[in-house]
Image (spheres, rainbow, N blue to C red):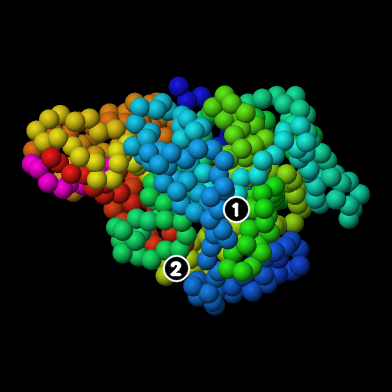
Amino acid sequence: MPGSAVPSPRSANRVDETAYDRRRLRQWLAGEARAEGVSRRTLLTLLAATTAATALPSPHRAHAADDAIRKPLPPEWFIRRGTNAETRWEALRGTGHHTPNELFFVRNHTATPLLDAQQWRLRLWGSGLRGAPGEDRPVEFGYDDLRALPAVVRTAFVECAGNGRSHYTTQQGEPVSGTPWTLGAVGVARWRGVRLADVLRRAGLTRHAVDLQPRGLDAEYVSGGENLGRVRRPLPLAKALDDVLLAYEMNGEPLPHDHGHPVRVLVPSWAGIASIKWVGDIEVSAQPLFSPWNTAFYRLFGPAHPPEGSAPLTRQTIKSAFELAAGATVPVGEEYVLHGRSWSGAGAVARVDVSTDDGATWRRARLHDRPRPDTWTRWSAVWKPGTRGPAHLLARATDTAGRRQPLTAVHNTQGYLFDAVVRHPVSVV
Ligand SMILES: Nc1nc2c(c(=O)[nH]1)N[C@H]1C(S)=C(S)[C@@H](COP(=O)(O)O)O[C@H]1N2
Ligand SMILES: [Mo]
């Protein structure tokens, strides 16, 4: 059973990221924000609403090293995509609620570093911690220090904001930049770690803190010839105090190297980029923070969005996937059980409808999990195909926040947050 041992005052603590972001930008203009590694032009673009979204840099992988990922990537489980590996949905058939670590997708901006837990230190620093004005006042924690704090366990998905991106092109004919994931840049694990809130309190958090910025110990990321520095992304304090973990175990094992060993940030229900792997330091700031990962990347740009882009992405959207290969063969005239999973960043998925006639009729799928937030709900539906030939399978989820997957997703240039019903091709033989 997916267990979430940490109660959280979710509705009370919802982050109004749009208003917050406007304030961030105003403070930056007034010289009250830190934006190391973000060009003035990028910030002005966001603010002044004059430059076209296409003028922003698009993410390029600096290298596609074969050793970017440490764990074995058998082709029947994974699709290699540069420094990343996408889980094949047919490989999840027969696995339980939690994605086995060996099958979990990997998204690396550069390459997995091999870190030693006993050498590892976490440094917290910045103007949002107690200390003499102008001083960084770093506070350090070792691996055993974290292990000695009260442990919590939480089941949550990690999903790349670009998961499903390729469907903007294949289903909607729209160009997008970035890794052309199908639907396999998502996994669910049982994470064990400590509350970031507990660590912040011990580090001397002040009431002036507004933003945090965890930073990875992996190599600096070079995109389009520009060194963007180490992977880091601001996190509003309200979310950090709500349900964020510093995770050191994944499905009962020490965190694997590819997933952030020895410790990663785990931000339930938010875009995967928030869950910084191999975390080495966290800036705690009394000023708003910017990095390329909340300015040029992980905002929505395009005709349907404000010229300066949307607010930085927070929660993931709603999706469904069949545990079936694209183009799988299904025997004609026999009852065939279709299996799948649906999930949403806004709430639990409590209803899934399936269509085997291109959306003309829908029937309710049987749910195999008690619907819970931050994770998926497994489901099944019986299909008895009557005629041979190509067909499409459709699944459409509805979450407890009232969101239902649309038939078309609203385009954005970087292809984030694809939420439309995916037409899964099969062949009836
Ligand atoms: N340090 C660091 N953290 C990172 C990344 C990275 O490249 N470096 N990638 C991010 C992105 S974009 C995603 S989607 C998730 C993927 O987590 P996983 O590789 O454990 O599946 O990690 C995030 N954390
Ligand atoms: Mo991602």
**Quarter occupied by the C terminus:** top left
Q: Is residue 197 left or right of residue 365?
A: right
Does residue 100 sit above or below 186 in this rendering?
Answer: above
What kind of residue is marked 2?
A: Gly
Foreground pick, 84 / 39: 84
Q: Callout 1: helix, strand or loop?
A: loop
Foreground pick, 423 / 240: 423
Foreground pick, 280 / 367: 280
Is the CB–ligand 1 distance for label 1 below 8 Å?
A: yes
Q: Which residue is mark 1?
A: 110
Q: Quadrant of residue 348?
A: top left
What kind of residue is marked 1?
A: Thr
Q: Quadrant of residue 63?
A: bottom right
Span colored in magenta: 387-395
Q: Which residue is mark 2?
A: 302
Q: Earlier in the sequence, mark 1 or mark 2?
A: 1
Q: Quadrant of residue 25?
A: bottom right
How far across and down, in percent of the image, does residue 172 sit?
30, 61
